[in-house]
Image (cartoon, helix red, strand yellow):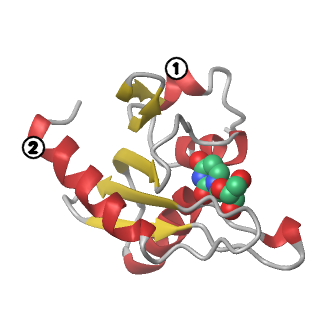
């Protein structure tokens, strides 16, 4: 669960991150912001490459930055994702798996067909792969 203020704060941060996106191939610019259990916010953007498969999504970009900047285990409370075109866009399967690594009750905020919606990562990725 997150508060309405946290919801808005994350969307604001994600919108700022879109400006950094590097997406000359798809022209689909994405920003993400994540809220950690310590109350910190990290952002990320998609970074594409001429070798298309090397592209990283905004959500994983934000999470990998947070891992690098966090001592101890990273636990996430929420992830927000926005795109410059304001079209419906939920996290891809790869990002869902990576998000699920960092908490079971993570709230995911994304653009749906009718505005932003919230789901839990458990709802977005049932039967998550885990090693333990
Ligand atoms: N993309 C993201 O960054 N996050 C998503 O949730 C969906 C897709 C990026 C990857 C690629 O750079 C572009 O959007 C088009 O697929």
Residue at image coords 61%, 41%? 96
Give the image location of residue 49, x and y in percent: 79, 78
Residue lying at 39% horizontally and 47% vertically, measured from the top left: 79
Q: Which of marks 2 and 1 is in front?
A: 2
In the image, residue 67 sits, relative to residue 102, either above or below, namely below
Residue 113 visible at all: yes
Q: Position of residue 87 (x, y in %)?
A: 51, 39
Quadrant location, ligand no. 1? bottom right
Along the viewing direction, whichever of 11 and 42 lies nearer the viewer: 11
Q: In the rendered view, tell whether residue 128 sits above or below residue 32.
A: above
Q: In this view, does 26 lie to the left or right of 58?
A: right
Give the image location of residue 76, x and y in percent: 37, 50
Q: Quadrant of residue 26?
A: bottom right
Queried on whether the Cβ of the residue with tag 2 lies below 8 angstroms from ligand 1, the answer reads no
Q: Give the alpha-carbon distance from disc 2 to disc 1, as whole Å.
A: 23 Å
Q: Name the residue under label 2.
A: 5
Residue neighbourhood size for the residue with mark 2, other residues' Cα within 10 Å, grouped as few (<14), some (14–19), many (≥20): few
Residue depicted at 67% across the width and 42% down the height = 92
Secondary structure of the residue carrying tag 2 is helix
* Marks 2 and 1, the one that precedes in the sequence: 2
Quadrant occupied by the N terminus: top left
Mark 1 Cα shell of 10 Å, populated few (<14), some (14-19), many (≥20): few
Q: In this view, does 130 lie above or below 50?
A: above
Element carrying mark 1:
helix
- Rendered image quadrant of residue 5: top left
Q: Quadrant of residue 118?
A: top left
Q: Nearer the viewer, residue 95 or 13?
A: 13
Residue 8 picture location, percent across and down: 18, 46
Q: Is residue 37 visible?
A: no
Per the rendering, the mark at residue 123 is 1
């Amino acid at each position: 669960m997150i508060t309405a203020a946290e919801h808005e704060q994350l969307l604001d941060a994600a919108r700022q991150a879109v400006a950094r996106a590097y997406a000359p191939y798809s022209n689909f610019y994405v920003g993400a912001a994540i809220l950690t259990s310590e109350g910190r916010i990290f952002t990320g953007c998609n970074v594409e490459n001429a070798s298309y498969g090397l592209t990283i999504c905004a959500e994983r970009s934000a999470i990998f930055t947070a891992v690098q900047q966090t001592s101890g285990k990273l636990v996430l409370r929420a992830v927000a994702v926005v795109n410059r075109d304001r079209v419906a866009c939920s996290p891809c399967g790869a990002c869902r798996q990576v998000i699920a690594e960092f908490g079971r009750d993570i709230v995911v905020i994304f653009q749906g067909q009718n505005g932003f919606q919230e789901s839990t990562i458990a709802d977005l990725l049932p039967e998550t792969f885990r090693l333990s």
